[in-house]
DNA sequence: GGCCTGTCGAACACGCTGTACAACAGAGTG
DNA sequence: CACTCTGTTGTACAGCGTGTTCGACAGGCC
C-alpha cells in the first residue's frame, strides 16, 4: 500500500470505498464488485470484453480480495443472477388464459411489464444471454430459468387444450419453445433497436402473435 | 523446422497437410484453418473458448502463417461467414403468402428447409450468434444478415395488408422483429433440445404461429 | 495492550496474443 | 544447375490477463 511509503496518503485509495462498518465487510465487497460491473455494463462495454482487472479498478478492490470472494469472473454473474431469479417471469407466471386479468388483454399487459423490466435492467439481462452462449456455469442458471418458464407455458397450453379452448393439434412443447426462447430474444432485439416509444405496440404484437398463433389459433 | 536437425524426418509434419500444388497455397491455408475450426466446433467446443493456438495445432499451420492470412481470431468467422451469406434465408425469401408454393403449406415447407439447414450447419451457425453478442465485427455481418431478412418480412406483411389479406392493425415492423429474431433463436434452441425427430412438427408450429399470429391473424 | 479477521499490495507462474525475423522449401526461369 | 521469388516455418519476444501466494497492515473486539 502507499501508506508504507507515504504515510500521509495512507488512506487515499480508500476514499472511493465505503467505510467498513462491521462484520458485513464481506457483503460490502461483493456489492461493490456487482455495482462496478453494473456501471461498466451501463457504459456500453460487453461483459466478455471487460477484464477482471478493469472491474477491480472500477470497484477500488484489491486483486487478492476479489479472489477471496469469487472463484473467477463468471461467479460474478452467478451472484448477480441470484438478484434476478424468478423476478423475470413472475409476470407471465401470474397470467392465465381465462379470467378477469387474463385473456389477450392480460397477456398484453404482462408483456408491457416484461418489456419495461427488460428495459430497466437491459445491460445485465443481455449479459446473461451473451455469456450463457459459451460459459457452462452461466448457461446452467440462465437456461434453467427459461426452462422453468417454458414448462409453465406448456402447462398452460395443455390446460387450455383440455378445456377445448386451444386446438388439440397445437404442439404444446414446440409452441412453448417458440414463445419463450423466441420471445425473449425478440424482446432483447426490440430494446436494442427501439428507443422506448414502440414498447406498447411491440407488447401488443407479441401478445397477439402468441394469442392467435397458439392459444386461440383458428382451427 | 525439424529438418534442420533431423534431415530424414524433414517432411514428417507435412504429412497431415495437403501438398502445395501451385499459387493457390494461400487459399489452401485458409481452407485448412476454416476446416480445423469446423472440426473443433463439431467436437463440441465453444468458439470463444477455443484459442488460436488450439486451432493452429488442429490445422497443422504455423502461428506466423496464420497471422499472414488473418488479422485475428474473429476474421476467421468473417471469412467463414462469406460461405453462408444469403444461403440461410433464401428459403423464406422465395416464399410468398399467396400462390401455388405459398400460403401456410409453403411456409411450413420453407421452415422445414430452414431447420434442416440449421441442423446441418449447427456448430457454425450457433457460433455466429454466440460471437455476435460481444464482437463488433461479427455483429456487423450477422445482424445485417438478419436485418435484411427482417426487411423482407416487413415488405411481405405490408403487401398483404395492401391486399387486405392481413389485418391493417398488424404492426408490420414489430411482427417482423418477433418472427425473424425470435424465430432464429427458437430454431437454435430447438436443435439443441431435439434429436431431429421433432423437426417436422416444430416446423409446423413455427409456420402456424407466424401464419395465424400475423399473416392471417383474426381481426 | 494483544488477538482476529479481512483487505491490501506486490510478486509470481502460466497461458495466450500478435509481431518480427531469419531460415527454408518449392516452383519457375535462364 | 544456379538463381530468384513467394510463401511457410520455427523461434523468440513483448505485452496483457489470470489466478495464487504471502507478508504487511488496519479496524473491531476482548
Image (spheres, coloured by chain):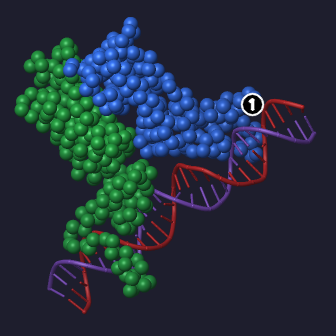
Chain colours: A blue, B green, C purple, D red
Determine the image quadrant of residue B205.
top left
Which residue reaches farthest left?
A: B100
Quadrant of the snapshot with the C terminus of chain B: top left
Q: Using the rendered image of the protein, determine whether residue B9 is visible from the camera's viewpoint.
A: yes
Determine the image quadrant of residue A211.
top left
Nearer-the-camera pick, B188 or A44? B188
Vertical placement of residue B141 versus A172, above or below: below
Please provide percent x and percent y for residue B6.
42, 84
Nearer-the-camera pick, B68 or B131? B131
Residue shown at the point (54%, 43%) measured from the top left:
A73
Q: Using the rendered image of the protein, determine whether residue A113 is visible from the camera's viewpoint.
A: no
Is A23 left or right of B23, judged from the image as shown? right
Residue ID for mark 1: A23
Vertical placement of residue A120 versus B201, above or below: above
Element type where label 1 sits in the image: loop
Residue shown at the point (27%, 61%) measured from the top left:
B31
Please provide percent x and percent y for residue A147.
43, 32
Amino acid at each position: 500500500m502507499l501508506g508504507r511509503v507515504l504515510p500521509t496518503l495512507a488512506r487515499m485509495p480508500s476514499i472511493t470505498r465505503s467505510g467498513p462498518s462491521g462484520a458485513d465487510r464481506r457483503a460490502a465487497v461483493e456489492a461493490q464488485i456487482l455495482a462496478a460491473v453494473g456501471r461498466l455494463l451501463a457504459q456500453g462495454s460487453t461483459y466478455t470484453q471487460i477484464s477482471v482487472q478493469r472491474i477491480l479498478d472500477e470497484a477500488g478492490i484489491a486483486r487478492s480480495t476479489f479472489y477471496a470472494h469469487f472463484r473467477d469472473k463468471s461467479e460474478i454473474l452467478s451472484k448477480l443472477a441470484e438478484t434476478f431469479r424468478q423476478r423475470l417471469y413472475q409476470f407471465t407466471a401470474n397470467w392465465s388464459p381465462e379470467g378477469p386479468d387474463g385473456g389477450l388483454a392480460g397477456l398484453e399487459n404482462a408483456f408491457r411489464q416484461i418489456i419495461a423490466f427488460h428495459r430497466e435492467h437491459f445491460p445485465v439481462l443481455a449479459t446473461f444471454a451473451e455469456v450463457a452462449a459459451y460459459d457452462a456455469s452461466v448457461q446452467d442458471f440462465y437456461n434453467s430459468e427459461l426452462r422453468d418458464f417454458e414448462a409453465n407455458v406448456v402447462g398452460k397450453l395443455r390446460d387450455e387444450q383440455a378445456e377445448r379452448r386451444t386446438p388439440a393439434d397445437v404442439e404444446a412443447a414446440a409452441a412453448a419453445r417458440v414463445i419463450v426462447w423466441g420471445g425473449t430474444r425478440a424482446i432483447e432485439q426490440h430494446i436494442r433497436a427501439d428507443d422506448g416509444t414502440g414498447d406498447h405496440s411491440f407488447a401488443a404484437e407479441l401478445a397477439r402473435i402468441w394469442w392467435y398463433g397458439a392459444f386461440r389459433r383458428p382451427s
